[in-house]
Image (cartoon, rainbow, N blue to C red):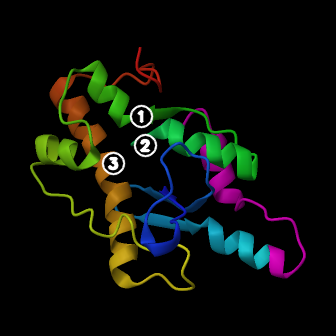
Amino acid sequence: SKPVPLQGGRSSDPSGSRPLAVVQAAGNNLAILWRLSRIREEAEKKGEEPRLPSLLGELLAAPEITKVCQGASHDAEPLFRAWGAACQALLDLHNLAIHYRTTPRSLQGLCAIFLRRRLDKAQRLSNWEQPNLDRAQIDYAAVDAWATREVLLAMRQSLGNGDATVPLEPE
């Protein structure tokens, strides 16, 4: 997921104190982007209470589906605070990397180590609230979600099973 950017295209602080603009998910051959800032904006224009899309809410709440994230604690808190989303079965790649004593621990670094591919992060700080995302942003968000999943699969193959009991916060 992407934090809402501040003026000048800078990202908000990673503490999760600002609402998320985009949440993305990926499987083997599919990526889905939910533009939460636009959903909120459209609901407010209609005088309605913004509601989390049902598919996203069900996915986040499903304890039987592991959701792998990079910085999961920074995504779960704003989703709960802004949307009431109870995120379950989150696995944080950063903390998994700490658990396995892997460095670097960024998604970009983990892609280099486990996928032997470069992950371009140029779009990370772009304006995720603009009315229409450009192709580069859409591609970036989809690849970012896909890469997170692929890194987990590669870590499991290389280091072990990637036990979902690894805590969200490092010990």
Q: Name the residue tied to disc 3.
A: 148
Magenta span of residues: 44-66
Q: Name the residue tied to disc 2.
A: 69
State whether residue 116 is above or below residue 73: below
- Mark 1 or mark 3: whose residue is earlier in sequence: 1
Q: Residues under labels 2 and 3: Cα distance?
A: 7 Å
Kindly indicate whether the residue at mark 3 contacts the one at mark 2 (C-beta within 8 angstroms).
yes
- Image quarter where the C terminus lies is top left
Q: How many neighbours does mark 3 have within 10 angstroms: few (below 14), some (14-19), or many (20 or more)?
A: many
- Give whichever of 11, 33 is nearer the camera: 11
- Give whichever of 40, 12 is nearer the camera: 12
Q: How many neighbours does mark 2 have within 10 angstroms: few (below 14), some (14-19), or many (20 or more)?
A: many
Q: Please state the horizontal and vertical placement of residue 6, each as a whole percent of the image.
A: 52, 66
Question: Residue 4 appears in which quarter of the rendering?
Answer: bottom right
Q: Is residue 160 left or right of residue 127?
A: left
Q: Residues under labels 1 and 3: Cα distance?
A: 10 Å
